[in-house]
């Protein structure tokens, strides 16, 4: 975790979460934009990824397990150990630190790829997140194909998803007065969650999520945006512009 303060603070906090195999330097353009706009930034990385990379083995049931990537958590899960908190608890602790230091008037969250997935799940669990932005990080199970299946934490076999699927998480992450969620997808993403050929299905689940929010009646808005012709699995200038628009509304 890194906690960065802007030169001219607006009093709000942006949690920015890195994805798989990303280091802090990879997100400097996005983080720089948030700092320039006056947001304090809590910079987070996934377990075992980027600055959190580890090759130290741990012992489980008398067997040494080397934690190379997220699929290394499978034997931990099989041994009855909890794993999903490893992705989420550091965010909660970082936010607690930011609150203790500066008492932000609002907290928002954004992330790319695995960081978008973390944003999806964390915003669903913590109603203090007002505006959340999942960039090329998730899609309902029914729309996934090939590489969209995702890493360990994103797969349907995790017991976590017996409690809530992605549509449920989208509703939970946007429900409440003043809360909102913007899902940003790249049209021809070379990695995952490309929208090509799935435009109608995406529009339908977005409409379904908003209908559920309206039925709950507590407020909240869900929207999605497609970056046309974008091939790289990345945060584009267009994505940052859309995020800024929603934050400044």
Image (cartoon, grey):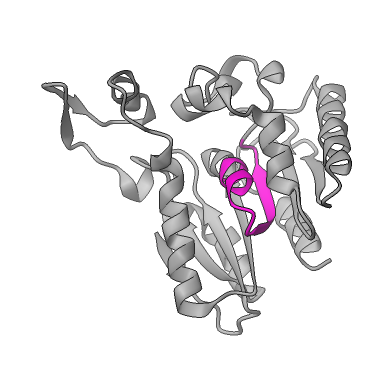
Residue beneath the point at 11% across and 21% down: 62
Nearest the viewer among 249 and 216 is 216
Give residue 203's quadrant in the image: top right
Nearest the viewer among 71 and 59 is 59
Could you tell me which quadrant the C terminus lies in?
bottom right
Residue 153 horizontal side relative to residue 178, left or right = left
Residue extending farthest to the bottom is 8
Q: Position of residue 238 (x, y in %)?
A: 75, 52
Q: Position of residue 210 (x, y in %)?
A: 85, 39
Nearest the viewer among 219 and 233 is 219
Rendered view: 60 above or below 232: above
Residue beneath the point at 17% across and 32% down: 58
Residue 21 seen in the current view: no
Residue 209 horizontal side relative to residue 14, left or right = right
Residue 123 sits inside the magenta stretch: yes
Residue beneath the point at 61% across and 81% down: 9
Residue 131 sits inside the magenta stretch: yes
Rendered view: 130 above or below 112: below
Residue beneath the point at 51% across and 79% down: 102
The stretch of residues the image draws in magenta is: 119-137
């Amino acid at each position: 975790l890194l906690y960065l303060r802007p030169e001219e603070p607006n009093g709000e906090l942006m949690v920015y979460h890195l994805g798989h195999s990303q280091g802090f330097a990879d997100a400097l353009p996005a983080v720089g934009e948030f700092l320039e706009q006056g947001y304090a930034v809590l910079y987070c990385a996934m377990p075992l990824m980027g600055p959190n990379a580890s090759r130290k083995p741990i012992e489980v049931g008398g067997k040494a397990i080397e934690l190379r990537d997220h699929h290394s958590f499978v034997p931990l899960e099989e041994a009855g150990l909890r794993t999903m908190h490893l992705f989420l608890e550091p965010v909660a602790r970082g936010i607690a630190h930011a609150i203790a230091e500066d008492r932000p008037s609002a907290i928002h969250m954004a992330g790319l790829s695995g960081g978008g997935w973390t944003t999806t799940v964390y915003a669903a669990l913590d109603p203090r997140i007002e505006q959340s932005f999942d960039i090329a990080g998730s899609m309902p199970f029914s729309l996934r194909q090939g590489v969209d299946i995702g890493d360990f934490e994103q797969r349907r076999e995790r017991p976590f998803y017996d409690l809530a699927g992605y549509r449920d998480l989208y509703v939970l992450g946007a429900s409440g007065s003043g809360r909102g969620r913007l899902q940003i997808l790249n049209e021809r993403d070379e990695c995952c969650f490309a929208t090509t050929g799935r435009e109608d299905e995406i529009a339908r689940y977005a409409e379904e999520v908003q209908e559920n929010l309206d039925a709950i009646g507590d407020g909240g808005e869900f929207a999605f945006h497609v970056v046309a012709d974008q091939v790289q699995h990345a945060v584009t200038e267009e994505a940052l512009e859309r995020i800024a628009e929603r934050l400044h509304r």
